[in-house]
Image (cartoon, grey):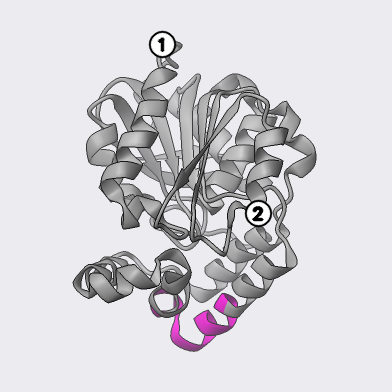
Amino acid sequence: MPNVTANKIRMNYEQQGTGEPLILIPYLAADHACYAFQVGEYAKHFSCISLDLRGTGASEKPPGAYTTELLADDVAGFMQAAGIRKAHVAGLSLGGAIGMWLAAKYPDRVLSLSLHSCWATSDAFQRTIVESWQIVAKTVGVPEMIIRAIFPWCFTPELYAERPDYIDSLASFVRSRPPQSVPDFIQQSNAVLAHDVDAHLGRIAAPTQITFGRQDQLTSTRFADRLKRGIRNSELLIFEGCAHAPLYENVAEFNHRTLAFLQRHTGAAGRLATPSR
């Protein structure tokens, strides 16, 4: 994978496709490969740049506290180092939380914003769940924690009952990726616990798609009204029959509906230069 130095760390990424740049920001404990089911379709229309955030994949893992704002500064630094003047930005869960900070702090860099299963401020229910993941990670390690503790929040009971082989294949995918260390997971999940961009939503100027799974409990539609009211140029989409991860639970509809939004907002392309290595 290529890499650039951004915000004083080395950041690795993967690039596929041609067209306007689309930056895909990973969710909690994931590396750049987490959007594997989307990139094949997106890359037919966009130059997809999938990142490894600090503390994940092949990017550097410096000590110190992580915040969603810091992770957004990393993405902005990546864009500067890679010669990307403007880009479409998409992320699920933590990836979307980072995307909100990026669009609020660096509005001139964001062509459109796609926020999937996101929230403006962490609440007590969400914090309790994430803290339980931290406990499990310390016991069994991060990959098994993802499969045993995070998966049940991501998928509906119906998916477990009707497609157990698919769940097994997703578990195998998780185990195939470079494992995140427990200390790095704790740092990254602490950023989730402390996330609060609520006061800055009004600074987001990019056209924004906000999506939720109807059966999501972790980041349920309880967060939808605040995001929709706070981000003035936004639209809301609900995926029926899905929990926290519609991008895996209903791949075809997720890809079709999110790609349609992205294509409606093409035309003000950012420049994608050859990144410095």
Reply above or below: 10 against 112: below
Residue 104, numbered circle: none
Rendered-image quadrant of the C terminus? top left
Q: Is 192 displayed left or right of 149 in the figure?
A: right
Disc 2 element? helix
Q: CA distance from mark 2 to mark 1?
A: 34 Å
Residue at point 26%, 23% (across, down): 18
Task: Between residue 11 and residue 204, name the one nearer to us.
Answer: 204
Q: Is 146 displayed left or right of 103 in the figure?
A: left
Q: How many numbered badges does the structure rendering display? A: 2
Residue at point 76%, 36% (across, down): 200
Q: Position of residue 236 (x, y in %)?
A: 54, 36
Reply above or below: 79 against 189: above
Reading the image, the residue beneath label 1 is: 267
Residue 275 seen by the camera: no
**Residue segment shown in magenta:** 133-144
Q: Position of residue 253 (x, y in %)?
A: 31, 43
Residue lying at the far right of the rendered structure: 199
Residue at point 33%, 57% (across, down): 249
Nearest to N terminus: mark 2 or mark 1: 2
Residue mark closest to the camera, 2 vs 1 = 2
Label 2 neighbour load within 10 Å: few <14, some 14-19, many 20+: few
What amino acid is found at the position of numbered circle 2 in the picture?
Arg
Residue 40 seen by the camera: yes
Q: Position of residue 106 (x, y in %)?
A: 64, 27
Residue 222, numbered circle: 2
Q: Position of residue 5 (x, y in %)?
A: 49, 39
Disc 1 element? loop
What amino acid is found at the position of numbered circle 1 in the picture?
Gly
Q: Main secondary structure of the magenta part?
A: helix
